[in-house]
Image (tube, rainbow, N blue to C red):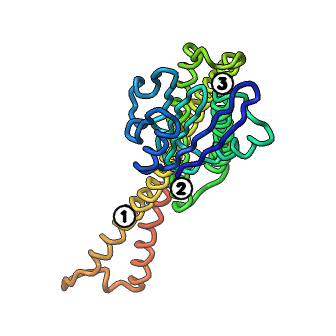
Amino acid sequence: MITIHRIAGTSAPPFCWVDLCQPSREELAEADQQVGFGLPTRAAIGEIEFSSRVRIEGDVLFLNVPRFQDEDGPTAPLGFALSPRVLVTQREQRMGSLQAVAAHLEKNPCRSSDDLLLRLLDQLVGQMADRLEALEAEITETTRMAFDQPHTSRDLERMLHAVGGMGRRLGGMHNAGHGLLRLATYLDGAAPDWFGDDAAKRIGLLHKDLVTLSEFEQHLDDRVEFLLDSVLGMINMDQNNVMKVMAVASVVGIPPTVLVGIWGMNFAHMPELKWHDAYYWALGVIALSVVLPLAWFRRRGWV
Protein backbone atom coordinates (compact mmCIF):
# COMPACT_ATOMS: atom_id res chain seq x y z
CA MET A 1 0.00 0.00 0.00
CA ILE A 2 1.30 3.46 -0.93
CA THR A 3 0.45 6.52 1.16
CA ILE A 4 1.75 9.92 0.07
CA HIS A 5 1.88 12.89 2.44
CA ARG A 6 2.60 16.15 0.62
CA ILE A 7 4.15 18.60 3.04
CA ALA A 8 4.78 22.30 2.59
CA GLY A 9 8.14 22.81 4.29
CA THR A 10 8.35 25.80 6.60
CA SER A 11 11.93 26.68 5.65
CA ALA A 12 12.45 24.72 2.42
CA PRO A 13 10.59 23.92 -0.83
CA PRO A 14 7.62 21.54 -0.53
CA PHE A 15 8.50 17.87 -0.17
CA CYS A 16 6.61 14.63 0.23
CA TRP A 17 6.63 11.61 2.48
CA VAL A 18 5.97 8.33 0.69
CA ASP A 19 4.98 5.56 3.09
CA LEU A 20 5.11 2.02 1.67
CA CYS A 21 3.46 -0.70 3.75
CA GLN A 22 3.97 -4.23 2.42
CA PRO A 23 4.36 -2.95 -1.16
CA SER A 24 3.89 -5.31 -4.05
CA ARG A 25 6.34 -5.41 -6.95
CA GLU A 26 4.05 -3.17 -9.00
CA GLU A 27 3.66 -0.66 -6.15
CA LEU A 28 7.41 -0.57 -5.61
CA ALA A 29 7.97 0.16 -9.32
CA GLU A 30 5.32 2.92 -9.17
CA ALA A 31 7.03 4.43 -6.14
CA ASP A 32 10.38 4.38 -7.98
CA GLN A 33 8.86 6.54 -10.72
CA GLN A 34 7.23 8.97 -8.28
CA VAL A 35 10.32 9.61 -6.13
CA GLY A 36 12.82 9.57 -9.00
CA PHE A 37 15.25 6.95 -7.68
CA GLY A 38 15.33 3.20 -7.19
CA LEU A 39 14.08 1.80 -3.89
CA PRO A 40 15.48 -1.38 -2.31
CA THR A 41 13.42 -4.56 -2.10
CA ARG A 42 12.34 -6.18 1.15
CA ALA A 43 15.21 -8.69 0.85
CA ALA A 44 17.75 -5.86 0.45
CA ILE A 45 16.40 -4.01 3.49
CA GLY A 46 16.62 -7.19 5.56
CA GLU A 47 20.34 -7.80 4.94
CA ILE A 48 22.33 -7.48 8.16
CA GLU A 49 25.76 -6.34 6.91
CA PHE A 50 26.56 -2.67 7.63
CA SER A 51 27.14 -1.81 3.96
CA SER A 52 23.51 -2.76 3.31
CA ARG A 53 22.19 -0.86 6.32
CA VAL A 54 23.69 2.52 5.40
CA ARG A 55 24.65 3.82 1.98
CA ILE A 56 24.55 7.01 -0.08
CA GLU A 57 23.78 7.18 -3.79
CA GLY A 58 24.10 10.75 -5.03
CA ASP A 59 21.86 12.89 -2.83
CA VAL A 60 19.86 9.89 -1.58
CA LEU A 61 20.60 8.43 1.85
CA PHE A 62 19.43 4.86 2.52
CA LEU A 63 19.04 3.77 6.15
CA ASN A 64 17.83 0.24 6.97
CA VAL A 65 16.97 -1.62 10.17
CA PRO A 66 16.91 -5.34 9.22
CA ARG A 67 15.09 -6.50 12.37
CA PHE A 68 12.54 -4.07 13.75
CA GLN A 69 9.64 -4.68 16.13
CA ASP A 70 7.00 -2.08 16.97
CA GLU A 71 4.38 -2.45 19.72
CA ASP A 72 5.21 -6.14 20.34
CA GLY A 73 4.28 -7.00 16.76
CA PRO A 74 6.19 -9.27 14.39
CA THR A 75 9.82 -8.59 13.58
CA ALA A 76 10.31 -7.23 10.05
CA PRO A 77 12.68 -4.94 8.12
CA LEU A 78 12.27 -1.16 8.25
CA GLY A 79 13.85 1.12 5.67
CA PHE A 80 14.27 4.85 5.11
CA ALA A 81 15.26 6.52 1.83
CA LEU A 82 15.93 10.23 2.15
CA SER A 83 16.65 12.97 -0.32
CA PRO A 84 16.30 16.77 0.01
CA ARG A 85 12.79 16.57 -1.48
CA VAL A 86 11.51 13.11 -0.53
CA LEU A 87 11.35 10.79 2.47
CA VAL A 88 10.37 7.18 1.80
CA THR A 89 9.56 4.72 4.57
CA GLN A 90 9.34 1.00 3.77
CA ARG A 91 7.73 -1.29 6.33
CA GLU A 92 6.08 -4.68 6.52
CA GLN A 93 3.67 -4.09 9.40
CA ARG A 94 1.38 -1.55 10.97
CA MET A 95 3.44 0.93 13.00
CA GLY A 96 1.66 3.17 15.46
CA SER A 97 4.77 5.36 15.81
CA LEU A 98 4.67 6.43 12.16
CA GLN A 99 0.92 6.99 12.27
CA ALA A 100 1.32 9.18 15.36
CA VAL A 101 3.79 11.41 13.52
CA ALA A 102 1.52 11.59 10.46
CA ALA A 103 -1.43 12.64 12.64
CA HIS A 104 0.49 15.68 13.96
CA LEU A 105 1.87 16.94 10.66
CA GLU A 106 -1.01 19.36 10.03
CA LYS A 107 -0.75 20.96 13.47
CA ASN A 108 3.04 20.89 13.56
CA PRO A 109 4.43 20.88 10.00
CA CYS A 110 8.00 19.86 9.26
CA ARG A 111 10.65 22.19 7.91
CA SER A 112 12.25 19.65 5.58
CA SER A 113 12.66 15.98 4.84
CA ASP A 114 15.53 15.56 7.34
CA ASP A 115 13.38 17.19 10.01
CA LEU A 116 10.66 14.62 9.32
CA LEU A 117 13.18 11.76 9.47
CA LEU A 118 14.46 12.88 12.87
CA ARG A 119 10.88 13.23 14.13
CA LEU A 120 10.18 9.66 13.07
CA LEU A 121 13.34 8.40 14.77
CA ASP A 122 12.49 10.37 17.94
CA GLN A 123 9.02 8.80 17.96
CA LEU A 124 10.44 5.29 17.49
CA VAL A 125 12.92 5.82 20.31
CA GLY A 126 10.21 7.21 22.61
CA GLN A 127 7.95 4.26 21.86
CA MET A 128 10.79 1.86 22.63
CA ALA A 129 11.51 3.62 25.92
CA ASP A 130 7.85 3.26 26.94
CA ARG A 131 7.91 -0.46 26.10
CA LEU A 132 11.10 -0.97 28.13
CA GLU A 133 9.55 0.82 31.11
CA ALA A 134 6.42 -1.34 30.88
CA LEU A 135 8.56 -4.47 30.64
CA GLU A 136 10.58 -3.41 33.69
CA ALA A 137 7.36 -3.06 35.71
CA GLU A 138 6.25 -6.54 34.57
CA ILE A 139 9.62 -8.05 35.51
CA THR A 140 9.49 -6.39 38.94
CA GLU A 141 5.98 -7.71 39.61
CA THR A 142 6.85 -11.22 38.46
CA THR A 143 9.99 -11.24 40.62
CA ARG A 144 7.95 -10.16 43.64
CA MET A 145 5.41 -12.90 43.02
CA ALA A 146 8.16 -15.48 42.58
CA PHE A 147 9.76 -14.83 45.97
CA ASP A 148 6.95 -13.50 48.16
CA GLN A 149 4.63 -16.50 48.19
CA PRO A 150 4.68 -20.31 47.70
CA HIS A 151 3.56 -21.67 44.34
CA THR A 152 1.95 -24.78 42.96
CA SER A 153 3.33 -26.59 39.94
CA ARG A 154 0.77 -24.87 37.70
CA ASP A 155 1.79 -21.46 39.04
CA LEU A 156 5.44 -22.18 38.24
CA GLU A 157 4.52 -23.36 34.75
CA ARG A 158 2.57 -20.15 34.07
CA MET A 159 5.44 -18.10 35.46
CA LEU A 160 7.90 -19.88 33.20
CA HIS A 161 5.74 -19.06 30.16
CA ALA A 162 5.55 -15.43 31.30
CA VAL A 163 9.34 -15.17 31.63
CA GLY A 164 9.72 -16.69 28.16
CA GLY A 165 7.40 -14.02 26.77
CA MET A 166 9.45 -11.29 28.46
CA GLY A 167 12.62 -12.67 26.92
CA ARG A 168 11.02 -12.79 23.47
CA ARG A 169 9.86 -9.18 23.67
CA LEU A 170 13.20 -8.03 25.06
CA GLY A 171 14.98 -9.77 22.19
CA GLY A 172 12.81 -7.90 19.68
CA MET A 173 13.57 -4.57 21.36
CA HIS A 174 17.27 -5.46 21.44
CA ASN A 175 17.33 -5.96 17.65
CA ALA A 176 15.36 -2.76 17.00
CA GLY A 177 17.37 -0.67 19.46
CA HIS A 178 20.76 -1.75 18.17
CA GLY A 179 19.61 -1.23 14.59
CA LEU A 180 18.55 2.34 15.35
CA LEU A 181 21.75 2.91 17.34
CA ARG A 182 23.87 1.97 14.33
CA LEU A 183 21.94 4.47 12.19
CA ALA A 184 22.29 7.22 14.80
CA THR A 185 26.02 6.49 15.17
CA TYR A 186 26.47 6.85 11.42
CA LEU A 187 24.44 10.06 11.20
CA ASP A 188 26.29 11.51 14.19
CA GLY A 189 29.55 11.35 12.29
CA ALA A 190 28.57 11.54 8.60
CA ALA A 191 25.27 13.38 8.18
CA PRO A 192 24.72 14.79 4.66
CA ASP A 193 25.59 18.45 4.11
CA TRP A 194 22.02 19.37 3.20
CA PHE A 195 20.70 18.47 6.66
CA GLY A 196 19.34 21.41 8.70
CA ASP A 197 21.41 23.52 11.07
CA ASP A 198 20.00 21.90 14.20
CA ALA A 199 20.24 18.36 12.82
CA ALA A 200 23.65 17.65 14.37
CA LYS A 201 22.39 18.56 17.86
CA ARG A 202 19.22 16.47 17.46
CA ILE A 203 21.18 13.49 16.15
CA GLY A 204 23.57 13.76 19.11
CA LEU A 205 20.67 13.69 21.57
CA LEU A 206 19.11 10.80 19.67
CA HIS A 207 22.39 8.88 19.88
CA LYS A 208 22.65 9.48 23.64
CA ASP A 209 19.06 8.31 24.14
CA LEU A 210 19.74 5.10 22.24
CA VAL A 211 22.94 4.42 24.20
CA THR A 212 20.96 4.89 27.43
CA LEU A 213 18.23 2.54 26.22
CA SER A 214 20.85 -0.02 25.20
CA GLU A 215 22.34 0.02 28.71
CA PHE A 216 18.89 -0.22 30.27
CA GLU A 217 18.00 -3.10 27.96
CA GLN A 218 21.14 -4.95 29.07
CA HIS A 219 20.08 -4.41 32.69
CA LEU A 220 16.65 -5.87 31.94
CA ASP A 221 18.26 -8.79 30.13
CA ASP A 222 20.26 -9.60 33.28
CA ARG A 223 17.09 -9.42 35.37
CA VAL A 224 15.17 -11.70 33.00
CA GLU A 225 18.04 -14.20 33.08
CA PHE A 226 18.07 -14.09 36.91
CA LEU A 227 14.28 -14.53 37.00
CA LEU A 228 14.48 -17.46 34.58
CA ASP A 229 17.15 -19.16 36.70
CA SER A 230 15.04 -18.56 39.81
CA VAL A 231 11.88 -20.04 38.31
CA LEU A 232 13.79 -23.05 36.99
CA GLY A 233 15.35 -23.49 40.43
CA MET A 234 11.91 -23.44 42.03
CA ILE A 235 10.67 -26.01 39.54
CA ASN A 236 13.64 -28.23 40.41
CA MET A 237 12.88 -27.82 44.13
CA ASP A 238 9.24 -28.74 43.50
CA GLN A 239 10.30 -31.85 41.59
CA ASN A 240 12.81 -32.74 44.34
CA ASN A 241 10.07 -32.48 46.94
CA VAL A 242 7.94 -34.90 44.93
CA MET A 243 10.85 -37.33 44.62
CA LYS A 244 11.57 -36.95 48.37
CA VAL A 245 8.00 -37.93 49.23
CA MET A 246 8.19 -40.92 46.91
CA ALA A 247 11.55 -41.99 48.37
CA VAL A 248 10.30 -41.69 51.96
CA ALA A 249 7.12 -43.60 51.10
CA SER A 250 9.12 -46.41 49.51
CA VAL A 251 11.53 -46.68 52.45
CA VAL A 252 8.77 -46.53 55.05
CA GLY A 253 6.84 -49.24 53.20
CA ILE A 254 9.69 -51.78 53.24
CA PRO A 255 9.56 -52.94 56.93
CA PRO A 256 5.78 -53.60 57.07
CA THR A 257 5.99 -55.33 53.70
CA VAL A 258 8.70 -57.67 55.05
CA LEU A 259 6.73 -58.43 58.22
CA VAL A 260 3.47 -59.07 56.36
CA GLY A 261 5.35 -61.27 53.93
CA ILE A 262 6.81 -63.36 56.74
CA TRP A 263 3.55 -63.79 58.62
CA GLY A 264 1.69 -64.54 55.43
CA MET A 265 3.76 -67.66 54.67
CA ASN A 266 1.88 -70.98 54.91
CA PHE A 267 4.26 -73.04 57.06
CA ALA A 268 2.88 -75.82 59.30
CA HIS A 269 4.78 -74.66 62.39
CA MET A 270 4.60 -70.87 63.10
CA PRO A 271 4.50 -70.23 66.90
CA GLU A 272 3.12 -66.70 66.47
CA LEU A 273 -0.09 -68.04 64.98
CA LYS A 274 -1.04 -69.78 68.23
CA TRP A 275 -0.31 -66.86 70.55
CA HIS A 276 -3.23 -65.23 72.28
CA ASP A 277 -3.79 -61.73 70.87
CA ALA A 278 -1.12 -62.42 68.21
CA TYR A 279 -3.18 -60.55 65.62
CA TYR A 280 -3.11 -57.33 67.65
CA TRP A 281 0.56 -57.74 68.38
CA ALA A 282 1.23 -58.12 64.65
CA LEU A 283 -0.71 -54.94 63.85
CA GLY A 284 1.22 -53.09 66.53
CA VAL A 285 4.60 -54.25 65.23
CA ILE A 286 3.65 -53.31 61.66
CA ALA A 287 2.53 -49.84 62.80
CA LEU A 288 5.75 -49.42 64.79
CA SER A 289 7.81 -50.39 61.74
CA VAL A 290 6.18 -47.46 59.93
CA VAL A 291 6.48 -44.92 62.75
CA LEU A 292 10.17 -45.55 63.56
CA PRO A 293 11.52 -44.70 60.07
CA LEU A 294 9.29 -41.59 59.91
CA ALA A 295 10.57 -40.46 63.31
CA TRP A 296 14.15 -41.00 62.17
CA PHE A 297 13.62 -39.02 58.96
CA ARG A 298 11.96 -36.20 60.89
CA ARG A 299 14.81 -36.07 63.40
CA ARG A 300 17.32 -35.72 60.55
CA GLY A 301 15.20 -32.97 58.95
CA TRP A 302 14.48 -34.93 55.79
CA VAL A 303 10.70 -34.65 56.08
Amino acid carrying mark 1 in the image:
Ser
| Residue wearing tag 1 | 250
Residue 144 tag number: none
Left or right? Give the position of 221 relative to 135: left
Q: Find the distance from the CA under tag 3 to the CA under tag 1.
A: 65 Å
Which of disc 2 and disc 3 is earlier in sequence? Answer: 2
Disc 3 to disc 1: CB gap under 8 Å: no
User: From this viewpoint, which residue is outermost toward the left?
Assistant: 268
Which of label 3 and label 1 is nearer to you? 3
Where does the image place residue 202, in percent across and percent down from the top left? Answer: 69, 21
The residue tagged with tag 2: helix, strand or loop?
helix
Q: Examine the rendering and report whether any part of residue 222 can be seen.
A: yes
Q: Could one spot residue 300 in this view of the protein?
A: no
Amino acid identity at mark 2:
Leu
What residue is shown with label 2?
A: 156
Q: Position of residue 76 (x, y in %)?
A: 47, 44
Q: For the residues marked 3 and 2, what is the alpha-carbon distance in whole angstroms?
A: 40 Å
Q: Secondary structure at mark 3?
A: helix
Say if 258 sits above or below 25 in the image: below
Say if 110 sits above or below 203 in the image.
Answer: below
Q: Is residue 48 above or below residue 23?
A: above
Can you tell which quarter of the image residue 134 is in?
A: top right
- In the image, which is nearer the foreground, mark 2 or mark 1? 2
* Residue in front for this viewpoint, 177 or 187: 187
